[in-house]
Image (cartoon, rainbow, N blue to C red):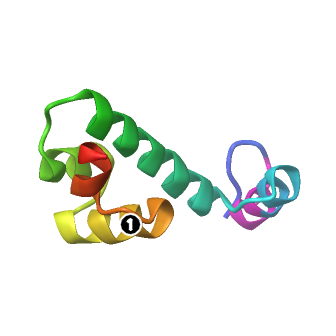
Amino acid sequence: MVNHTGYSSSQVRRQFRQSFQITPSAYRKKRRLERAAVLLALTPLNIAQIAICCGYHNHSSFSRAFQHRYQLRPRNFRNH
């Protein structure tokens, strides 16, 4: 499939990875978790609300991804 730039999606993904040394999906996940960390630190939103705000469909998948990135559960990160 060709997008409006004339490049296929695989070409765009490959160029992104060559330029930034990270895949687009890994970058998106990284940014979502960084946003979640800010929300945990600065807002009273509960963890389920933060998960939804950051694009996760459920609390458990968000918690697993967050713990993998920060080596802390979201609740522990907030209380840290």
Place of residue 1 in the rendered image (x, y in percent of width and height, measured from the top left): 66, 64
Residue beneath the point at 38% across and 61% down: 66
Magenta-colored segment: predominant secondary structure:
helix
Place of residue 59 in the rendered image (x, y in percent of width and height, measured from the top left): 18, 63
Magenta segment: does it hold 50? Answer: no
Give left or right: position of 54 versus 51. right
Q: Looking at the image, can residue 58 be seen?
A: no
Q: Which residue is mark 1?
A: 67
Q: Could you say which is closer to the camera, residue 30 or residue 69? A: 69
Residue furthest toward the top?
42
Residue beneath the point at 14% across and 32% down: 44
Secondary structure found at label 1: helix
Give left or right: position of 2 versus 67. right
Q: Amino acid at mark 1?
A: Gln
Name which quarter of the figure residue 72 lies in. Answer: bottom left
Place of residue 16 in the rendered image (x, y in percent of width and height, measured from the top left): 78, 53
Residue beneath the point at 43% across and 50% down: 33
Q: Could you say which is closer to the camera, residue 22 or residue 5? A: 22
Highlighted magenta segment, given as a residue range: 6-13
